[in-house]
Image (cartoon, rainbow, N blue to C red):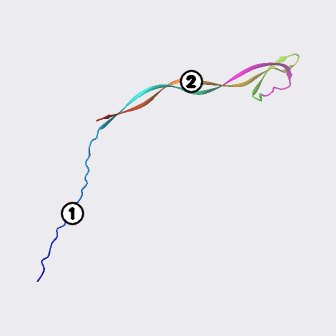
Amino acid sequence: MTEPSEQLSLMEEQLVVDKRPVSDGRVRVSTRTEFVTEAAEARLDSENVEVTRVAIGREVSEAPQVRTEGDVTIVPVMEEVLVIEKRLMLVEEIHIRRVATSEDVSIPVELRKQRATIERED
């Protein structure tokens, strides 16, 4: 004889996780533009010349060349003088010196800056 078989039923629970979007609130972002005046600063360099006439009044045998001594350029000025004979006379020299200057300047300049505002909407 066969013995009756017993069946045992088992149960099992299963977990299913699902997601769905939920709105928890909103935010509004807005920008505004401000105008701000700031000073633009720079150094302006310039160069000027000083001209000095130096009387010489000396007889020379030939015309001197334009020459430079340090930061001075010397330009000879000649004239012919009639005595009994013609002679070359150095009348004057023109001395030219460069003078450099610097000047600090400040100029107002209008600049734009944006600001962001964030507001939460429930």
* Label located before the other in sequence (1 or 2): 1
Say which residue appears at 29% left-offset and 38% top-offset: 25
Residue 64 is inside the magenta segment = yes
Estimate the spatial distance between the alpha carbons at disc 1 and disc 2, rounded to whole Å: 83 Å
Which label belongs to residue 12? 1
Residue 106: mark: 2
In the rendered structure, the answer to whether residue 42 lies left or right of residue 9 reads: right
For this view, does 22 lie left or right of residue 34?
left
Residue 37: x %, y % from top left: 49, 24
Question: Considering the image in quadrants, where does the N terminus appear?
Answer: bottom left
Is 87 covered by the magenta stretch?
Answer: no
Question: In the rendering, at what x and y percent does residue 46 appear?
Answer: 64, 25
Task: Please tell me whether residue 21 is drawn above or below residue 82 in the rendered image.
Answer: below
Q: Which circle, 1 or 2, is nearer the viewer?
A: 1
Q: Residue at x 25, y 48 (%)?
A: 20
Residue situated in front as seen by the camera: 5 or 106: 5
Say which quadrant the C terminus sits in. top left
Which amino acid type corresponds to the residue marked 2 in the rendered image?
Ser
Quadrant of residue 61 within the rendered picture? top right
User: In the image, which residues are magenta?
Assistant: 47-65
Q: Which residue corresponds to the image point at 19% horizontal and 66% vertical from the top-left?
A: 10
Residues packed near mark 2 inside 10 Å, few (<14), some (14 to 19) or many (20 plus): few
Mark 1 burial class by Cα count in 10 Å: few <14, some 14-19, many 20+: few
Q: Which amino acid does label 1 sit on?
A: Glu
Res. 40 mark: none
Label 1 element class: loop
> Is residue 22 left or right of 105 when viewed as pictured?
left
Instruction: Tell me whether the residue at label 1 lies in contact with that at label 2, contact meaning CB atoms closer than 8 angstroms.
Output: no
Residue 5 at x, y percent in the picture = 14, 76
